[in-house]
């Protein structure tokens, strides 16, 4: 049974109990089914879903169907999808497809098409899958589903021909993004037929013809195809010819990773020299760090680091150093960046949070906690400060203190969700339920 999706969750937010699917599952996992059953009895879908999932997990599909059945009458898509999954699991595929087919023309038509096609293809009924997908290939998800569900069913020649015809239509009909999606879909089908050379030629022709507008995904796939086919000389020539490096960057990343994986790290480093800035630093850090050349990796990335960690490289460096038990070096690096904050609170908090992380890695939890308590956010009760402190308290086995911190900060959607989850996990269920029923201050 599939988990509820975020858009569906938002659309079906409970009005009474305040229990979303997440909280309902959490209550069941921690042995508190009564509130969930009570809410389900009042018609709350997400609680019925959580109970149905639990029933299916223990093999009681009849109970799961009984829980879902009242919601089918609403005509909503999600109950139909869940019920169809239960029917299919019992071998009742005709009934499942009939249920899914009833939503092919509604507000969830795209989701229904995809679910119908996947279910039909799982039972070898590819013609039925194609029948619902083919008229709607202007939709990217539908197009990708077509490629997915036809794999292994002997239809690749047909599908390749269909995609080739679509790709040959005027570009103005599809747009650049659409053309890229079609090209990549066609390459996937060609490649699984053993026609990877044709796929590479297709992409190279598109790259040459559309240098100013070709999508990075096509360049990456072109590079992957050449690497898999052992055609590295061609890939190197492409990288060399791309004098402005707007496209070569994608190819360099793939080839450098391949070379490093074979132990040819120096060649990967030489290749990355064609890049610049944070991109070059990131590639060098990746190939050197994975090869155990940690000092060189840190040296390569150091010029691109900043106290805001705007490119994510600082976090990666600290993680590498901590794994290699070089916490002192990590802390020295943070000290080196500190003067560059120039009083910027966001930068200061970023460095403090990383410093607390490294102190914990070194077994110095109390120092880390003292550092976080000294942050100006402690007086202001900011959400960011609460996040840092509760994360630390959780990692050091102090959940009661984490709850107290969350109770002390202004109530927001984030703080309420964090509080409710912890209260449920640690047995304070009535408090959690009261919290979830209460509206937020700004509601």
Image (cartoon, grey):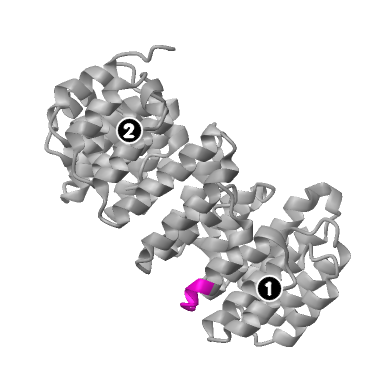
Q: Nearer the viewer, residue 118 or 361?
A: 361
Magenta-colored span: 290-295
Q: Quadrant of residue 341?
A: top right
Q: Nearer the viewer, residue 326 or 391?
A: 326
Q: Quadrant of residue 168?
A: bottom right
232 drawn magenta? no
Q: What x and y, as percent, mark residue 247?
A: 77, 65
Q: Along the horizontal axis of the image, is 188 left or right of 91? A: right
State the residue position of label 1: 272
Look at the numbered disc 1 and give the secondary structure of its residue.
Answer: helix
Say above or below: 62 vs 430: below
Say above or below: 267 vs 94: below
Residue 373, label in figure: 2
Give the residue displayed 41% in from the left and 43% down from the top.
353
Q: What x and y, as percent, mark residue 90?
A: 26, 53
Bin the neighbour count of mark 2 within 10 Å (Cα to Cα): few under 14, some 14-19, many 20 and up.
some
Q: Quadrant of residue 371?
A: top left
Q: Along the horizontal axis of the image, is 302 left or right of 204? A: left
């Amino acid at each position: 049974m599939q988990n509820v999706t975020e858009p569906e969750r938002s659309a079906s937010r409970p009005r009474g109990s305040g229990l979303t699917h997440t909280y309902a599952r959490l209550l069941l996992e921690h042995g508190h089914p009564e509130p969930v059953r009570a809410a389900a009895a009042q018609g709350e879908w997400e609680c019925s879903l959580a109970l149905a999932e639990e029933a299916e997990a223990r093999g009681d599909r009849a109970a799961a169907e009984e829980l879902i059945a009242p919601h089918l009458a609403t005509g909503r898509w999600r109950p139909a999808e869940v019920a169809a999954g239960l029917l299919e699991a019992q071998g009742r595929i005709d009934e499942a497809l009939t249920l899914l087919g009833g939503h092919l023309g509604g507000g969830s038509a795209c989701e229904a098409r995809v679910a119908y096609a996947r279910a039909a293809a799982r039972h070898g009924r590819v013609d039925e899958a194609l029948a619902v997908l083919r008229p709607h290939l202007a939709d990217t998800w539908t197009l990708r589903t077509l490629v997915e569900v036809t794999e292994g069913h002997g239809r690749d020649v047909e599908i390749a021909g269909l995609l080739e015809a679509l790709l040959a239509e005027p570009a103005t009909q599809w747009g650049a993004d659409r053309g890229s999606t079609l090209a990549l879909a066609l390459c996937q089908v060609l490649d699984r037929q053993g026609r990877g050379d044709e796929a590479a030629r297709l992409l190279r022709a598109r790259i040459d013809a559309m240098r100013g507008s070709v999508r990075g995904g096509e360049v990456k796939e072109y590079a992957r195809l050449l690497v898999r086919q052992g055609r590295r000389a061609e890939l190197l020539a492409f990288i060399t010819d791309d004098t402005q490096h707007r496209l070569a960057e994608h190819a360099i990343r793939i080839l450098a990773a391949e070379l490093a994986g074979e132990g040819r790290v120096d060649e990967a480093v030489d290749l990355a020299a064609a890049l610049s800035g944070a991109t070059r630093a990131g590639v060098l850090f990746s190939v050197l760090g994975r090869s155990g050349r940690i000092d060189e990796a840190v040296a390569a990335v150091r010029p691109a680091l900043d106290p805001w960690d705007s490119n994510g490289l600082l976090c990666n460096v600290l993680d590498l150093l901590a794994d290699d038990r070089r916490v002192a070096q990590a802390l020295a690096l943070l000290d080196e960046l500190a003067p560059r904050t120039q009083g910027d609170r966001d930068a200061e908090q970023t460095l403090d949070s990383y410093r607390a992380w490294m102190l914990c890695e070194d077994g110095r939890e109390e120092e880390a906690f003292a550092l976080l308590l000294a942050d100006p956010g402690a007086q202001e009760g900011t959400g960011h400060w609460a996040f840092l402190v509760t994360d630390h308290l959780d990692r050091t086995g102090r959940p009661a203190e984490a709850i107290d911190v969350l109770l002390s900060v202004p109530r927001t959607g984030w703080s309420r969700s964090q509080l409710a989850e912890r209260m449920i996990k640690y047995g304070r269920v009535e408090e959690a339920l009261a919290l979830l029923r209460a509206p937020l201050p700004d509601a």
